[in-house]
Image (cartoon, rainbow, N blue to C red):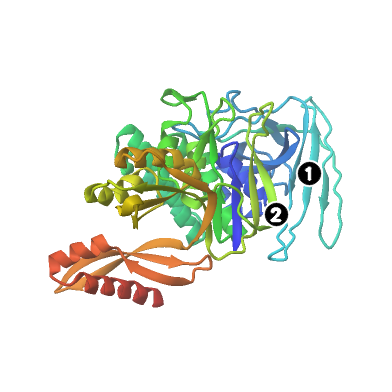
Amino acid sequence: MRLLAFDGRMGASGDMLLGALVAAGADPSVLSPVEDALDVTYRVHEVDKNGILATKVDVLLAEADGGDPRGEGHGDDHRHQPEPEDGTGDERDEGDRDDGDDVDAGHSHQHQYRRHDRARGESAPDHTHSHDDSHAEGHDHSHDHDHDHSHDHDHDHSHDHDHDHTHAEGHGPHRTYPEVVDLVESMDLPAGVVADATAIFRVLGEAEAEVHGTDLDATHFHEVGADDAIADVVGVCLLLDDLDVDRVVTAPVAVGGGEAEMSHGTYPVPAPAVVNITAAADWSVRGGPVESELLTPTGAAILAHLAEGVESLPSMSVESSGYGAGGRDFSDHPNVLRAVVGDGGSRLVRDDISVLETNLDDATPEVLGGLQETLKDAGARDVTIVPTTMKKSRPGHLVKVVVRPEDAERVAYRLAVETGTLGIREHGAGHRWTARREFETATLDVDGDDYEVSVKVGSDADGVVYDRSAEYDDALAVANETGLPVREVMRRAVNAVASEASD
């Protein structure tokens, strides 16, 4: 199983995700459909972040860019303009793009990207472009190009020109969700990329609609509906498609701290839209480690749609890795997002857990019956109640609760107040192996009427299905309405999903 793992201890934004994927081996040439459809172009270059060589991807206005920022050529008129110093006013409505890209009047930088993919046995060209810009009239530029091909050729040319790179943040109309979907669907993209990109924008749109109390279709994406934000989202989906991974995971993602300036004023970090997005995500967040906005709505939405949550880097044979750069520099923390690609090995998913236990000898059936729902609402992954014999041969119950380690204290408190227990044991954090679980909807025809029943489908990492089970509550509702036995409804639902899968 080919696995992509993100380490988001310094947060995530659209441009950091782009850089991390390119650095981990994705081919930036796949981004061309976005450049063809929008008035933007991507500039890929390398920067130093506290001693870490990281890849920075900037989205620039194509009409203002005199060359090919992906390193395939250089034009004769391009001037660097620094992004806003506060580094927060790029692609967001409720706060987005990581930060500004600091540009000095005289500087040198490299455009370099390599592909290493042992699993597929490919190694793409190594393009290195170095130039030192003094930004004075009539200055001289020397561009050295080394291409690792079957033939070698060096290009050494000097010419006088200005640099004019205009960042594209906020460029283009502020679109509604349907307008963004229409634009993405009009691009020349693989079907899977279209599906992922539109799903990510739906996550963003629903989060903003909830913040503003509006309908999804009527909600305007402010900066996150502009060209550069669309280039970020669709670009990430294209690069991920190029990496051809089977599973994406992320460790807990840092949100930062303090306050951030947004289009609606000053808000505490994380931004309101980020809070809404992460509430529905499979992964967890943590505050810090700096007083700055680290997780943007675009970064959160991308990860919410694509990534499963893990507590740490899973077991894997590493094939490639890289770092995507944010704009700001922090004295004690490299501002980078790490991406690691490799063989995940196991066909089941490793899930880090803790187990809570308590013995009860005076709980009523009503209290026990409600624990499944109340504890799962508090964050429990599974709840088991086992009849047992207590001291003096009194009947009792052993309650076992599976939780994520970070949810243990909250669930333990809920267990205590619900049952009155005076002590709860926690087993040290371990893990469990779980199947991939998806829900499919079965439509049943009963006497000319259609009824829907959800069916849970269990499969391994290779997509091999080995279990299907109908949801009891759905089946019970259909049984009550039709007069069919619950068991018969469940049987028909499972057969309907299996039959559709075999077609």
| Residue 158 left/right relative to 98 | right
Residue 378, image x and y in percent? Answer: 36, 42
Please give the name of the residue rendered at 73% of the width and 32% of the height, measured from the top-left corner: 50
* Residue 225 visible in the displayed image: no
Q: In this view, does 36 lie above or below 245?
A: above
Chain-order first, disc 2 or disc 1: 1
What kind of residue is marked 2? Answer: Ser
10 Å neighbourhood of mark 2: few (<14), some, or many (≥20)?
some
Across and down, in percent, residue 18 comes to: 60, 45
Q: Which residue bears the numbered disc 1?
A: 129
Name the residue nearer the viewer: 111 or 493: 493
Which residue is labeled 2 in the image?
Answer: 320
Instruction: List x then y, in percent, for residue 158.
Output: 84, 38
Looking at the rendered structure, which numbered label has been put on residue 488?
none
Quarter that holds the N terminus: bottom right
Q: Look at label 1 and name its amino acid.
A: His
Residue at 61 percent across and 60 percent down: it is 344
Discs 2/1, front: 2
Where disc 2 sits, the SS reads strand
Residue at 18% over, 72% down? 485
